[in-house]
Image (cartoon, helix red, strand yellow):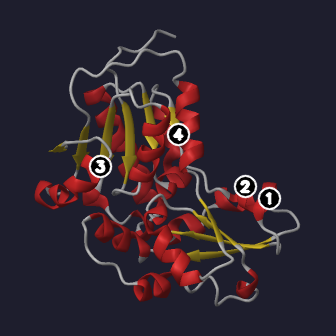
Amino acid sequence: MDQPAQDSPILLFDSGVGGLTVLGELRELLPQAPVIYAADMAGLPYGAKSEAEIAARVAGLLGRMAERYQPRLICIACNTASTIALGMVRDVLETPIVGTVPAIKPAAALTKTGVFGLLGTEATMRQRYVDDLEHAFAVGKRLLRHGANGLVPLAEAKLRGERVRIDDVADSAKGLMLQTHGSEIDTIVLACTHFPLLEQELREAFGQGVEFVHGAQGIARRIAHLTEGQPFARSTGDCAITTGALANFERLAPAFAERGIDRLERF
């Protein structure tokens, strides 16, 4: 396979800005890599959409973005989009694709009580892919799931610099602990890339004795592995693009600037 151009970017795609958790880890491993961050703000929230809607939207957008930006690799930094559309996207694009997998395997190994939780969007919770991960890696353990769509706008608000109330975070996530055996949970998988942005608030909401696990580090390591030996050089500064209104997107400029992205554009 031919080497990509030095300035060929890594494209990180998410429904919103949850993928910034992946970008942060990627910066640690590949600080020299050019990046385009793509936020489908016009399609937010994915968690409330049907599987058919998400699959068609993600495949269509990534096809157009791949044609325009010629990325060396695409990361779908969104659990909902990955669990639903990853196979379709890989079928239609030649670009290497990295998906986002709920961190059920490490969480199952970490739990001491044998009961652990999975917080994600409602769409992610009902995917067979999640069932398969549970059956493969959580045999003999009890996995409780809860769709917490309300955490997504709270994470977006936090990145805009708005105050997020602990009570609001707790209200969105409490359905996990209210289930039978919920009080025995000692480990929670954050199966949405938005949710680690609220880890501090979630720790306060759930109290001491609960560990949180997410996949951002593993995703970054996978990207680094797949691009090992490739040359990297920026010809321009890194860029973030949105399908939504640019004025709203620009309210997130400080959060992007903290992660080395100073240019925001509409796709």
The residue tagged 2 is: 106
Quadrant location of residue 69?
A: top left
Q: Residue at x 59, y 77 (%)?
A: 146
Give above or below for 164 relative to 108.
below
Earlier in the chain: of badge 2 and badge 3, it is 2
Q: Residue at x 47, y 65 (%)?
A: 195
Q: CA distance from mark 2 to mark 3?
A: 29 Å
The amino acid pointed to by label 1 is Ala
Q: CA distance from mark 3 to mark 4?
A: 18 Å
Q: Residue furthest front?
A: 208
Q: Give x and y (percent) for residue 142.
A: 79, 73
The amino acid pointed to by label 4 is Ala
Q: Are marks 4 and 2 in contact (CB under 8 Å)?
A: no
Task: Depth check: give the residue in front, 130 or 50.
Answer: 130
Q: Secondary structure at mark 2?
A: helix
Give neighbour class at mark 3: few <14, some 14-19, many 20+ (Cα, 10 Å).
few
